[in-house]
Image (spheres, rainbow, N blue to C red):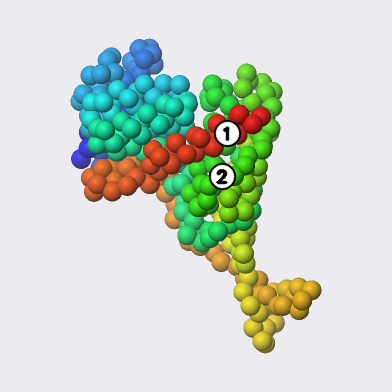
C-alpha cells in the first residue's frame, strides 16, 4: 500500500482525499493547504490529518497528489520529485512549457514516476470506443460549461479544451502541422470562448470549441474515419458507432444500403459497445498506483501531459 499525501484541499482536492482514503491501494497520510483556515476546516469536517508544512508532508509519503491551482503545479512537483517522490499532477501539467520540460528532466534524474490528471482518458464512454478509432481524418469537439469562477485563473483552453486536446493526441498518431484559433474574453481577463483548428501532418483535421459561459453543459466529440463515424458523449457517457461495409449481394429487408454515383453499394450498421460504469478519478489514481507497483508506464505520462500543454499554448498564441 502506497503512502500518499494531497496538496490542495479545494473542491477537487476534497474529492481526491475521499477517494484515496477509500482506495485499498493507498494509505492516506494527510494533506497540506496553504490556507490554514481551509486546512483546519477540512481536517475537522472529514478527519484527515492536516499538515501545516508542505515539506513535512512530502517527507512522510511515497506519492504526492498535486491538486493545487495550475500556477503552483511546478513548484509543488519539483519539491516532491527532488525528494524522490512519485507525483500525480492535475491537468494542465504546469503553467508554462519550460516548467513542464524541466519536470521531464527531474522525472528521469530522480527515477520517479509521474501522471497527469487528464481524467477523460478514463471516461467509460471514451474507453469503450478508443480501440475502434483508427486513423481518424476529421474530428469535431464541443466542450461547453456554465460559468464557474473555478478555473478562470487560466484561459478556457487550459481549463476545458485541454481535455479534448489530450484525447485527440491519444488517437491521432501524427505531428501537428498547423494551428489556427480565435478566442474571446467575455467575463474573465483571459479568453472564455475559444475555437481551434488543428491540422496534422497525416492530413487529419480537428476542430475544437470550448466555452465556459454557456447556458448548458456539453462534452461531445465526433470522430470521422474511413467507413466509420464514432460519437462520444463524455457528459452523458454514451457512444454511437456507425460503420459501413460492402453490401451483401442479397440485402435483407431491414438492411440499410447506400449506393454512390459509381454504383458501389455499402451497408450501414451500428455497433453498441459495452460501457462499464466507473469512477474515472478513482481509476486514474489507482492505475497510477499500479504503474508504480508494477514499474510500468502510467496511462497519461508527463510527456503526454507536456505535449497537450504545448498544443494548448500554441492555440493561445495564435489568438
Residue wearing tag 2: 176
What percent of the width, then of the height, locates residue 195? 67, 37
Residue wearing tag 1: 314
Give the structural element (helix, strand or loop) at label 1: helix
The answer to whether residue 210 is left or right of residue 295 is: right
* Quadrant in which the N terminus appears: top left
* Quadrant in which the C terminus appears: top right
Which circle marks residue 170 in the picture? none
Please, which residue is most extreme toward the bottom here? 250
Badge 1 vs badge 2, beta-carbon distance below 8 Å: yes
Other-residue count near label 2 (Cα within 10 Å), few / some / many at <14 / 14–19 / ≥20: some
At a point 66% along the width and 21% down the height, the residue shown is: 187
- Reply above or below: 127 against 78: below
- Reply above or below: 235 against 262: above
Other-residue count near label 1 (Cα within 10 Å), few / some / many at <14 / 14–19 / ≥20: some
At a point 24% along the width and 36% down the height, the residue shown is: 111
Q: Quadrant of residue 49?
A: top left
Give the structural element (helix, strand or loop) at label 2: strand
**Whether residue 48 is visible:** no
What percent of the width, then of the height, locates residue 45? 34, 22
**Whether residue 219 is visible:** yes
Q: Quadrant of residue 252?
A: bottom right
Count the marks.
2
The answer to whether residue 257 is left or right of residue 125 is: right
Q: Quadrant of residue 50?
A: top left
At a point 45% along the width and 21% down the height, the residue shown is: 71
Q: CA distance from mark 1 to mark 2?
A: 10 Å
Amino acid at each position: 500500500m502506497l503512502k500518499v499525501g494531497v496538496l490542495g484541499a479545494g473542491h477537487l482536492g476534497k474529492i481526491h482525499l475521499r477517494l484515496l482514503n477509500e482506495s485499498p491501494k493507498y494509505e492516506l497520510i494527510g494533506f497540506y493547504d496553504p490556507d490554514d483556515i481551509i486546512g483546519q476546516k477540512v481536517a475537522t469536517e472529514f478527519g484527515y490529518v492536516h499538515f501545516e508544512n508542505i515539506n513535512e508532508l512530502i517527507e512522510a509519503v511515497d506519492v504526492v497528489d498535486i491538486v493545487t491551482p495550475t500556477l503552483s503545479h511546478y513548484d509543488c512537483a519539483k519539491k516532491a520529485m527532488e525528494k524522490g517522490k512519485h507525483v500525480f499532477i492535475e491537468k494542465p501539467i504546469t503553467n508554462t512549457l519550460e516548467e513542464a520540460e524541466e519536470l521531464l528532466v527531474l522525472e528521469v534524474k530522480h527515477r520517479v514516476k509521474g501522471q497527469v490528471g487528464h481524467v477523460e482518458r478514463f471516461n467509460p464512454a471514451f474507453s469503450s470506443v478508443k480501440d475502434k478509432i483508427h486513423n481518424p481524418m476529421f474530428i469535431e469537439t464541443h466542450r461547453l460549461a456554465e460559468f464557474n469562477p473555478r478555473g478562470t485563473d487560466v484561459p478556457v483552453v487550459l481549463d476545458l479544451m485541454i481535455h479534448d486536446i489530450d484525447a485527440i493526441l491519444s488517437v491521432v498518431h501524427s505531428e501537428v502541422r498547423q494551428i489556427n484559433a480565435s478566442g474571446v474574453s467575455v467575463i474573465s481577463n483571459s479568453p472564455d470562448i475559444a475555437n481551434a483548428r488543428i491540422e496534422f501532418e497525416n492530413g487529419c483535421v480537428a476542430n475544437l470549441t470550448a466555452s465556459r459561459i454557456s447556458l448548458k453543459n456539453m462534452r461531445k466529440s465526433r470522430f470521422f474515419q474511413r467507413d466509420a463515424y464514432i460519437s462520444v458523449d463524455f457528459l452523458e457517457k454514451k457512444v454511437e458507432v456507425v460503420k459501413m461495409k460492402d453490401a451483401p449481394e442479397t440485402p435483407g429487408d431491414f438492411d440499410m444500403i447506400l449506393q454512390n454515383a459509381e454504383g458501389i453499394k455499402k451497408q450501414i450498421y451500428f455497433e453498441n459497445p459495452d460501457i462499464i460504469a466507473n469512477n474515472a478519478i478513482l481509476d486514474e489514481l489507482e492505475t497510477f498506483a499500479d504503474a508504480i507497483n508494477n514499474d510500468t508506464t502510467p496511462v497519461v505520462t508527463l510527456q503526454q501531459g507536456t505535449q497537450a500543454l504545448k498544443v494548448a499554448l500554441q492555440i493561445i498564441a495564435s489568438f
